[in-house]
Image: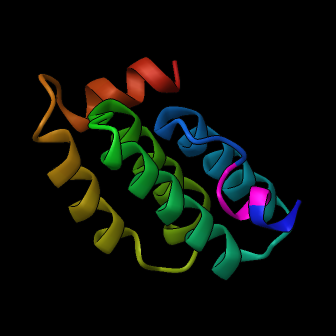
């Protein structure tokens, strides 16, 4: 079970990325910011491994919103997010409107 949890519970990159992102949100809500950041990073890595660039951008947005902004590291997160969004046909603002209407 522990190995399964660490792997996101699936061999499919998209599903793994969702599992890690959900874990990141839960950990952030519990105030476990270091673990939450690791979970969001794992979500991004899983999404990128499957070429799911939109999901990478969404998970980076969540990382910024739930972890980095509160830690005073918003600019660091914003740079990573802008790099990810540059591979999409939208802006960071478009992503926000789509994901957080």
Identity of the residue drawn at 51% across and 52% down? 43
Q: Which residues are magenta?
A: 4-8
Q: How is the image coloured?
A: rainbow
Corner quadrant of residue 26: bottom right
Q: Quadrant of the N terminus?
A: bottom right
Q: Main secondary structure of the magenta part?
A: helix
Q: Position of residue 99 (x, y in %)?
A: 48, 24
On screen, residue 26 versus residue 90, left or right, reads right
Task: Indicate whether residue 62 is drawn in magenta.
Answer: no
Q: Position of residue 5 (x, y in %)?
A: 78, 58
Residue 25 versus residue 5: which sits nearer the camera? 5
Residue 7 versus residue 77: which sits nearer the camera? 7
Residue 55, compared with residue 38, is above or below; it is: above
Corner quadrant of residue 58: top left
Identity of the residue drawn at 47% across and 59% down? 64
Identity of the residue drawn at 48% across and 40% down? 13
Corner quadrant of residue 76: bottom left
Q: Position of residue 85 (x, y in %)?
A: 20, 40
Residue 9 versus residue 73: which sits nearer the camera? 9
Identity of the residue drawn at 51% across and 62% down? 42
* Count of all numbered marks drawn on residues in the image: 0
């Amino acid at each position: 079970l522990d190995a399964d949890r660490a792997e996101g519970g699936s061999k499919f990159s998209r599903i793994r990325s969702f599992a890690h992102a959900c874990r990141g949100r839960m950990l952030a809500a519990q105030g476990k910011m270091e673990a939450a950041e690791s979970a969001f990073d794992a979500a991004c890595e899983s999404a990128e491994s499957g070429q799911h660039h939109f999901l990478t951008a969404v998970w980076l947005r969540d990382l910024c919103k739930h972890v980095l902004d509160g830690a005073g590291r918003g600019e660091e997160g914003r740079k990573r997010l802008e790099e990810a969004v540059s591979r999409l046909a939208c802006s960071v603002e478009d992503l926000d409107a789509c994901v957080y209407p």
